[in-house]
C-alpha cells in the first residue's frame, strides 16, 4: 500500500540523486571537452558542437527514463496529485476530477524532460552570467566562446524530426520515452532563438544588465510561451539557413 510506495519512492529518490550528481558533473566536463575540440578550425560551427552536446544530454535522459522513471508507478503518483488538486478546487466548478486527472497524467509523463530542460536553461544562464561578471571585473578568460557561427547541422534536424514522428506513431510505453527525448532535443532550437533575440536586442542602446533583466522578466511572466516562441524562431531560422547554404 502506501508504506510500500514510500519505501520504493525513497530508494528511487536516492538513486535519482546519485544519477543527478553524475549528470551535473558530466554536463560541465562534456561541455568544455566539446568546445575545446578543433579550436584552430574557425569554420567549425558552434552549432555542430551544441548538437552533439544536446544529443549526449538526451542520451542521459533516455538512461534516466529507462533505469528510474520506468520503475515508478505513475498511476499512484497521478492519483496522489489529483486528489491534492481536487481538495484545492473542491468548491470550484471550473475543473472536474476527470480534467484534473488527465492534465496531471500528461504533465507527469513529460516531467523528466521538463526538469532536464530547466537544468540546461540554468546551466547556460549561469554560463552567460559568469562571462558577464568576468568581463565587468576585467579578468582574463581562459576559454572564449563565440556563438556567432551558429548553424545546427542537417543530421540533427533529421534526428529531431525522427523523435517527433516517433512520439506520435509509437504505442503508449514507447511514447513516454520519445516524448521526453523530443522535448529535450528541441532545446538547441530554443537556444538558437534565444541567441538571435539577444543579438536583436543588442542593436538598441540598452545597458547589458537591463537587457538580461528584461529577458528574465519575460521568462517570469510568459514562461513556456516564451520558450515556445524562442523555439519557433530558432527552428525557422536554422531551416532557412540550411536551405540558403544548399543553394
Image (cartoon, grey):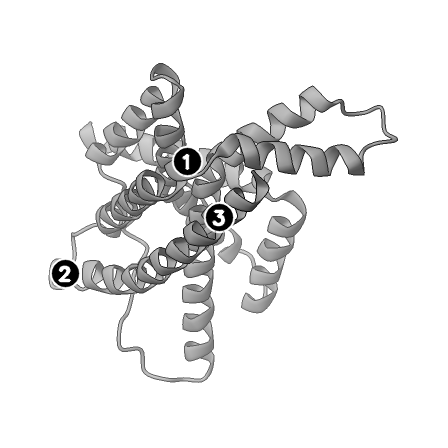
* Front tag of 1 and 2: 1
- Label 2 CA crowd tier, 10 Å (few <14, some 14–19, many 20+): few
- Displayed quadrant of residue 105: top right
Report the residue marked by disc 3: 9
| Residue 228: % across, % down | 51, 36
The residue shown at (40%, 53%) is 16
Q: Is residue 93 left or right of residue 159?
A: right
Residue 121, placed above or below residue 71: below
Question: Is tag 1's residue or tag 3's residue first in the polypeptide sequence?
Answer: 3
Q: Is residue 194 at all visible to an observer of this figure?
A: yes
Q: Secondary structure at mark 2?
A: loop
Quick one: 67 or 191, which is closer to the camera? 67
Observer-side mark, 3 or 2, equals: 3
* Furthest residue toward right: 91
Q: Quadrant of residue 238?
A: top left
Residue at image coords 83%, 32%: 90
Vertical placement of residue 21 versus 235, above or below? below
Residue at label 2? 37
* Along the viewing direction, whichever of 76 and 33 lies nearer the viewer: 76
Q: What residue did someone put label 1 on?
A: 183
Q: In the picture, residue 153 is in which quadrant?
A: top left
Residue 196 seen in render: no
> How many C-alpha atoms fall within 10 Å of the one at disc 3: few (<14), some, or many (≥20)?
some
Amino acid at each position: 500500500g502506501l508504506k510500500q510506495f514510500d519505501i520504493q519512492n525513497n530508494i528511487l529518490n536516492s538513486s535519482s540523486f546519485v544519477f543527478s550528481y553524475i549528470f551535473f558533473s558530466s554536463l560541465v566536463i562534456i561541455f568544455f571537452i566539446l568546445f575545446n575540440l578543433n579550436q584552430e578550425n574557425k569554420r567549425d560551427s558552434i552549432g555542430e558542437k551544441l548538437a552533439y552536446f544536446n544529443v549526449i544530454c538526451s542520451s542521459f535522459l533516455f538512461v534516466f527514463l529507462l533505469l528510474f522513471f520506468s520503475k515508478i508507478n505513475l498511476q499512484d503518483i497521478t492519483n496522489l496529485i489529483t486528489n491534492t488538486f481536487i481538495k484545492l478546487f473542491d468548491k470550484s466548478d471550473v475543473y472536474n476530477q476527470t480534467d484534473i486527472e488527465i492534465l496531471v497524467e500528461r504533465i507527469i509523463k513529460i516531467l523528466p524532460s521538463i526538469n532536464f530542460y530547466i537544468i540546461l536553461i540554468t546551466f547556460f544562464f549561469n554560463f552567460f552570467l559568469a562571462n558577464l561578471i568576468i568581463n565587468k571585473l576585467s579578468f582574463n578568460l581562459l576559454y572564449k566562446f563565440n556563438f556567432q557561427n551558429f548553424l545546427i547541422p542537417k543530421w540533427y534536424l533529421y534526428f529531431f524530426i525522427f523523435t517527433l514522428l516517433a512520439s506520435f506513431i509509437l504505442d503508449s510505453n514507447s511514447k513516454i520515452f520519445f516524448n521526453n527525448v523530443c522535448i529535450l532535443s528541441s532545446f538547441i532550437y530554443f537556444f538558437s532563438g534565444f541567441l538571435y533575440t539577444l543579438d536583436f536586442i543588442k542593436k538598441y542602446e540598452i545597458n547589458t544588465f537591463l537587457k538580461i533583466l528584461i529577458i528574465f522578466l519575460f521568462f517570469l511572466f510568459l514562461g513556456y510561451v516564451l520558450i515556445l516562441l524562442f523555439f519557433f524562431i530558432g527552428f525557422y531560422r536554422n531551416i532557412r539557413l540550411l536551405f540558403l547554404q544548399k543553394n
